[in-house]
Image: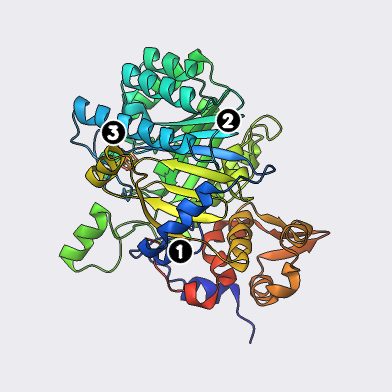
């Protein structure tokens, strides 16, 4: 029986309820287990595939304040000496990796400082950290070095240091431009700090500045969202990322919902959030931007690349340093210890802090790439035939049939293309590609 586009929105539940919406990897994390950690060690002892790019991610888990919607592993109470202990642990972690056959001697194609708030670090801490990282695994051939920032932590001097360490993309976690909304959601920065930080960053001359927005923060309205888009356009960043607000279980918002016995989160409906992202993309397109994924618009697609995303979504190796970080090495997924002390202590004892792992089957690896690439809005049938020897048209015909019937998918030559309405629901639609045992799994 054909399913209509209206039906998918109904069975998706229009109200925002607790849980993860964003699909960042596959198979779901709940299938990665502690008894498979040996698979990660075996992968690290093998030689790498010479054609596969390597990336390095470092999680800096410190923030000035915890946002009410935050679901990351972050700490707001660590003093300078605890931060140094952490940085030393991260350097020790990279040193252990540099001695493994899979990593040693390789040059990362991309480096990513995520968080948390990497810009929470002082300039001295930053230089100490990056000098050591470069000594162990030089990133002089990296095409892209991304650094996430919270506007209120930036000074002109700090931005110069961030530029000098080699950062090519500064990603500003603006999220919204309305003071009331920033406050209501527990953001540490205020609206005036955005302009200040952006002005400094432009003056310093980063090759790419990205503004990160969230559609559907608590208290958002049509007027406020229109204002957020106006202000973004006025600043003219090289790229804009827009995410639809989700309320995972480990957020303050969910804790309050539970206490109050509320099932529905105090944020906009999914339909409203899609309207807002649609509006943002439409307005950015009228300003000459190009939408390059379910979350991204770029001013000049020839100049502004997202190497991190494009490499990861086509199977690059990724070494994830830091507490709770995720890695993907030689076909094995794993995650680090997700608490500060066990992470630091394992490294102090000379051991990699790997907590849980999974080596996906070849079918699961294919599905992983298919899911991630679908979020670009187009997948190449030939790519999957060549890499996995699988005709995805036939193998996943049930999923394509559904997406076609809902009006979100078409075929163009070698490509399956998701239209804008499909792209706005990409994280829901990709569940159609999941194996049955993964369909109801939690992404935690
Ligand atoms: S700034 Fe980002 S990482 Fe830090 S608490 Fe807020 S959402 Fe979480």
- Residue 234 picture location, percent across and down: 52, 27
What residue is shown with label 3?
86
Instruction: Give the Cα separation between the discs numbered 3 and 1.
Output: 28 Å
- Is residue 442 placed above or below 228 in the rendered structure? below
Q: Earlier in the sequence, mark 3 or mark 2?
A: 3
Residue at horizontal 33%, vertical 64%? 18
Task: Using the rendered view, name the quadrant where residue 356 is placed.
Answer: bottom left
List the single residue furthest toward the right: 413
What residue is shown with label 1?
28
Residue at horizontal 31%, vertical 34%? 89
Helix, strand or loop at mark 3: helix
- Residue 378 picture location, percent across and down: 69, 55
What residue is shown with label 2?
144
User: Circles 2 and 1: CB distance less than 8 Å?
Assistant: no
List the single residue furthest toward the bottom: 1
Q: Is residue 214 left or right of residue 85?
A: right
Quadrant containing ligand 1: top left
197 and 384: which one is in front? Answer: 384
Of discs 3 and 2, which sits in the foreground? 3
Instruction: Give the Cα separation between the discs numbered 2 and 1.
Output: 28 Å
- Residue 292 picture location, percent across and down: 64, 45
Classify mark 2: residues with Cα within 10 Å, few (<14), some (14-19) or many (20+): many
Whether ligand 1 has any atom under 8 Å from the Cβ at mark 2 is answered as: no
* Residue 40: assigned label: none
321 and 41: which one is in front? Answer: 41
Residue 192 seen by the camera: no
Q: Earlier in the sequence, mark 3 or mark 1?
A: 1
Residue 299 seen by the camera: yes
């Amino acid at each position: 029986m054909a399913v209509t586009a209206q039906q998918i929105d109904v069975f998706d539940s229009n109200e925002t309820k607790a849980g993860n919406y964003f699909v960042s990897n596959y198979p779901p994390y709940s299938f990665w287990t502690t008894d498979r950690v040996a698979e990660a060690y075996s992968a690290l002892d093998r030689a790498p595939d010479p054609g596969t790019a390597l990336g390095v991610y470092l999680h800096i888990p410190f923030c000035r304040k915890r946002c009410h919607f935050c679901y990351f592993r972050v700490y707001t109470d660590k003093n300078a000496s605890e931060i140094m202990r952490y940085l030393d642990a991260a350097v020790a972690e990279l040193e252990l990796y540099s001695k493994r056959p899979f990593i040693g001697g390789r040059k990362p194609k991309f480096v990513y400082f995520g968080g948390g708030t990497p810009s929470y670090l002082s300039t001295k801490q930053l230089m100490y950290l990056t000098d050591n990282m470069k000594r162990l695994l030089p990133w002089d051939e990296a095409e892209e070095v991304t650094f996430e920032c919270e506007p209120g932590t930036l000074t002109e001097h700090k931005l110069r240091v961030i530029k000098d360490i080699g950062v090519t993309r500064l990603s500003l976690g603006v999220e919204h431009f309305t003071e009331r909304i920033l406050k209501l959601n527990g953001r540490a920065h205020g609206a005036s700090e955005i302009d200040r930080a952006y002005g400094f960053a432009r003056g310093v001359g980063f090759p790419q500045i990205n503004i990160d927005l969230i559609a559907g923060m608590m208290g958002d309205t049509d007027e406020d969202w229109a204002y957020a888009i106006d202000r973004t356009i006025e600043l003219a960043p090289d790229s804009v990322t827009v995410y639809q607000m989700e309320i995972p279980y480990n957020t303050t918002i969910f804790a309050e919902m539970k206490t109050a016995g509320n099932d529905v989160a105090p944020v906009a409906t999914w339909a409203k959030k899609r309207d807002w992202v649609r509006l943002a993309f439409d307005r950015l397109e009228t300003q000459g931007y190009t939408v390059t994924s379910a979350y991204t618009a770029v001013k000049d697609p020839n100049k502004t690349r997202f190497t991190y995303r494009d490499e990861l979504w086509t199977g690059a190796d990724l070494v994830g340093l830091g507490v709770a970080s995720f890695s993907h090495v030689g076909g094995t997924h794993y995650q680090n210890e997700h608490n500060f002390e066990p992470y630091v202590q394992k490294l102090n004892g000379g051991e990699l802090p790997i907590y849980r792992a999974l080596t996906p089957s070849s079918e699961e690896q294919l599905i992983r790439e298919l899911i991630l690439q679908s979020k670009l809005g187009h997948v190449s049938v030939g790519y999957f035939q060549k890499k996995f020897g699988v005709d995805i048209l036939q193998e996943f015909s049930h999923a394509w049939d559904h997406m076609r019937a809902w009006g979100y998918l078409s075929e163009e030559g070698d490509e399956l293309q998701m239209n804008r309405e499909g792209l706005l629901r990409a994280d829901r639609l990709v569940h159609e590609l999941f194996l049955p045992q993964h369909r109801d799994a939690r992404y935690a």
